[in-house]
Image: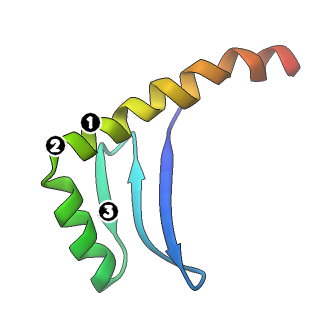
Amino acid sequence: IEYIRSFYYNKLELTRFSSSVGKFVGFTEYGVKNAEYWNNDPSKVSAMKAQKEAVCLNNVQIDYRAA
């Protein structure tokens, strides 16, 4: 199970957080600057890692029962 949070502007992906990578990755010049800033904030990174447990792992049982 992987948690992905992407940030878009005008249909262009700027930045993405992936729980498998464990950090933000930028895809544009502006996105790279944001990713560097967010990766230097340990509370932001740990909060995004915690979202995997709060969102994905909490709801996986519901999805398996529905299938």
Q: Secondary structure at mark 2?
A: helix
Q: Looking at numbered disc 3 in the image, what kind of residue is underneath it?
A: Val
Q: Give the residue displayed 87% in from the left and 20% down from the top.
A: 66
Q: Residues within 10 Å of mark 2 (few under 14, many from 20)?
A: few
Q: Are marks 1 and 3 in contact (CB under 8 Å)?
A: no
Query: Looking at the image, is mark 1 or mark 3 nearer the viewer?
Result: 1
Q: Give the residue displayed 57% in from the left and 85% down from the top.
A: 10
Describe residue 43's horizontal placement relative to residue 59 as left or right: left
Q: Give the residue displayed 39% in from the left and 53% down from the top.
A: 17
Say which of 59 and 25 sits in front: 59
Position of residue 49 relative to residue 27, above or below, is above
Q: Are marks 1 and 2 in contact (CB under 8 Å)?
A: yes
Q: Give the residue displayed 55% in from the left and 21% down from the top.
A: 57
Q: Which residue is mark 2?
A: 42
How many angstroms separate mark 1 from mark 3 (CA)? 15 Å
Q: Looking at numbered disc 2 in the image, what kind of residue is underneath it?
A: Pro
**Sequence-first tag of 3 and 2:** 3
How many angstroms separate mark 3 from mark 2 (CA)? 15 Å
Q: Position of residue 56 (x, y in %)?
A: 57, 29
Query: Looking at the image, is mark 3 or mark 2 nearer the viewer?
Result: 2
Mark number displayed over residue 46: 1
Q: Position of residue 46 (x, y in %)?
A: 26, 36
Describe residue 43's horizontal placement relative to residue 49 as left or right: left
Q: Which residue is mark 3?
A: 25
Q: Looking at numbered disc 1 in the image, what kind of residue is underneath it?
A: Ser
Q: Residues within 10 Å of mark 3 (few under 14, many from 20)?
A: many
**Sequence-first tag of 1 and 3:** 3
Q: Secondary structure at mark 3?
A: strand
